[in-house]
Image: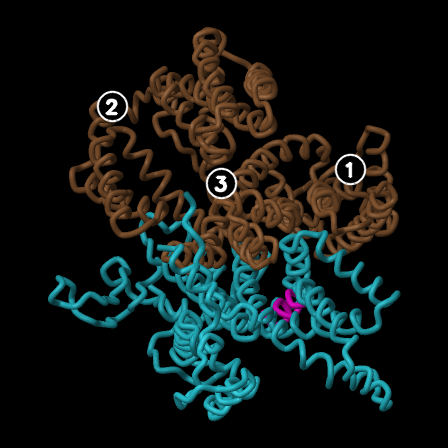
Amino acid sequence: MSEHQNNDELRGSSNMQSEMGPDGHPVVSLAEVEDAELAKNESQSRSQGQLIRRRFLNHKPAIISSVVLVFITVMAFSSIGFAGIPGWWDKDYSKAGELINGGAPTLSLLPTWLGGSGLAFGESPFGQDNTGKDYFALVMRGTQKSIIIAVIVGMVATFIGAIIGAVAGYFRGWVDEVLMRITDLFIVIPLLVLAAVLAQMVGNKSGSIFALAFVLGLLTWTGLARLVRGEILSLREREYVAAAQAMGSKTSRVIFKHLLPNTVGVIVVNATFAIAGAILLETSLSYLGFGVQPPETSLGLLISQYQNAFTNRPWLFWWPGMIIVAIALSVNFLGDGLRDAFDPRQTRKAKRRKTKELS
Amino acid sequence: MLKFIIKRLGASLGILLAASFLLYVLVINSGDPLQDLRESTADNREHLMAQRVEYMNLDQPWYARYWDWLTGVGKCFGGACDLGTNIQGQNVNDLLAVAASSTLRLVILATVLAAIFGIAIGVLTAVRQYSGLDYGVTFLTFLFFSLPVFWAAVMLKEYMAIGYNDWIKEPDISMVQIIVIALLFGFLMQVFLAGDLKRRIITFAVSAAFVGVAIPYLLWLNFFRYPQLGLVGIIILSLAVALSGTAMTVGVRNKAVLYPALITVGLGIIAYYATFSLLESPSTWLLIIGGALSMIIPGAIGYFMGGRVRKIAMWVSAFTGLVAAGLTTVDHIFRAWPEFLALKPRPIGTIGSQTPNFDGGFWEIFLDRGAQLLLPTLLLAIISLASYSRYTRTSMLEVGQQDYIRTARSKGLSERTVVFRHAFRNALIPIATIAAFDFAGLIGGAVITETVFGWKGMGEMFKTGLEHIDPAPVMAFFLVTGTAAVLFNMLADIFYALLDPRIRV
């Protein structure tokens, strides 16, 4: 079976094999065939941005992930409200209430004809904790905070990483040497260790999640800095950079106007992965007790607070964990889709090559 | 080369020094180590405070404290480290020695497992790019990437450990479960072995039927409480390894490889009887020496009988010997299992690196440590397995587009040779770097795993140290992880240069 396909491949792409033009007449030269081919396709020519958008929209996992991500975000911010604006969910995350049915979740997704009680949201869809607090409100609040932290970390890390990488790559020489040694310094200390130390420092001083997010952002830029540096090192040898320099552009203009926009693919893709990493880093730190500190909350902190309740009230443990997995998984798939869209070398299926099965 | 290594070593030491300085300053400024005493109402408060100040040299300025620590570490080059004392006045050297042994056991095992399985899965998915298997594995790796370690750990504890421990009391599998397991196994086997529709159906039917017969048979034997392998099992399995090893390298028709492998199987049978009483209660050294011999002797046989394919014959025979020796060990472990179950009715542990007050023979203690090690290792391995398989896949696909692969295919080499001899070897080069990073990263990641499973390891040492603003244990932790990171990175660079002749240093 596979040999047959290999033969197909050997024959080469389809537009070369035909000796006939699109209108059926025999054609004289190869150039004419190509012209005809081009003329036929002219209506379909696209800009770089359109190509990227098309490739992204064709990436099914990425689209599904975007929908999931938007859904979770909208849910988290609209349900219990944000920054003083009230939400549509009527229960408060801080008020203890009466335990109903041991606090079991009332959410049911199983339709009646399958033996469930129909699609219903119920009084407390995610259940209640041991003091009767509505767990849906608590989880939504944790989700809000975790998303805020992740986005801030992603932005700070991307900003620092891009700048340091660009400066190191553009100036080379001793600037590069110094900046890259600093990067190594951050890589040698395990991320979790450095993050725990700094988070504890911030926690003791201010305790705000914004400060925590900012500090975590200061630690996670190293990977991006290395990648951007590599890109810039090769981009700076291009003619258009030499032209810009010859016309007397300022260094900052060359870097920000000519070089960084061309590395946007690497930057965007890594920003998404940085966000996914930040969600996990924040939850791990909070779990260890170095991250978000109690009156504030986050998904990791919820898991850590309720982990002993697993045997009696497993839902207290399930929901925050599932939301962490859902967010991190969709951000990762989103990043994968963006990488495929920005990097034409990796377009799916285009370079499909069937190899023989291992025998 | 030497100059390159020395240069790298110098730069690494500099970075390590700067990093230690940074971490030290950050740790001692992250809070107030006397906090709990300031708030306490104990009578001897002043005395306790004075004592702690003395233990931690709090009366000295920060640079003096760092210098003290640094000179203490500097003594390591003279063979006598002095890592200072912790907040309770305990010597950190002793703490580290205990902690490092359990953590390293965990991390090394997890890295080895993750590397072997991750690379194998990566190669398989790359060879079958865009197949159902590839998509399935891709989804799973993304899932593992996105899994919070502590969350997964609690799930493993609940469903695997407690579930298994309840089940092993009276091992029973209902008919429905057997059918489900058989169908699932059949499905997985046909996914892995692939082929056309007919072959897939046959694979599915054969493996499902096999499981459907095997599980009731094992239950009838009460295998799960009284497992046995026996000589017959060892012979069949090591023959299978000898044959498949030969088939994967040069094909079974090549006698120069096949015969040494078969002779090795024969030797394994003799060794099984010869070492039987010796292995009833062995020692660690005995096992290591036995393992080494089981590779060296078959290797020598392969060397003398291999002829033109001497190197391959050596490897195949040595591998067969190792597997035969491993199976003999497993046989003895199986024999110790009922005894172990009697001593420890709930075998899989969820807390600590060993059961307190556990007493038994060598194999019983071995099983106890293994059962305690099982869950944390599984967890760490699964998570780093995801990155190994992903990187291997990318690397294999990249190599697969090279010209020399096309050349190899077009000159008519078999797909096996192209994949294993041409593509795989070159794809391994970048993975050396990842393995280095991964090992150092795993020691850091072990902090969470150890917390969840209640291990008294380095992670725990770091965590309590940081909670008490106690620099000595934190720095001891960093010393191990940082040195490991730098060392493995350097080894990776050197390997890189050795493996890839295009890199000139």
The chain holding disc 3 is B
Mark 2, Cα crowd under 10 Å, few <14 / some 14-19 / many 20+, is some
Eye-nearest disc, 3 or 2 = 2
Mark 3 vs mark 2: tell me if same chain: yes
Q: Considering the numbered disc 3 on the image, is that residue within a helix, a strand or a loop? A: helix
Establish if A103 lies above or below B411: below
The chain holding disc 2 is B
Mark 1 vs mark 2: tell me if same chain: yes
Mark 3 vs mark 1: tell me if same chain: yes
Q: Position of residue A44 (x, y in %)?
A: 47, 89
Residue located 47% across and 68% down the image:
A348
Q: Mark 1 = which residue?
A: B84
**A80 sits left or right of A197 in the view:** left
Q: What color is chain B drawn in?
A: brown
Q: Which chain is cyan?
A: A
Distance in Å between CA atoms under marks 3 and 1: 30 Å
Residue B389 at least partly seen: yes
Eye-nearest disc, 3 or 1 = 3
Q: Mark 2 = which residue?
A: B222
Q: Position of residue B411 (x, y in %)?
A: 54, 50
Mark 1, Cα crowd under 10 Å, few <14 / some 14-19 / many 20+, is many
- The one nearer the camera, B380 or A146, is B380
Q: Which three-letter amino acid code belongs to the residue tagged 3?
A: Pro
Distance in Å between CA atoms under marks 3 and 2: 28 Å
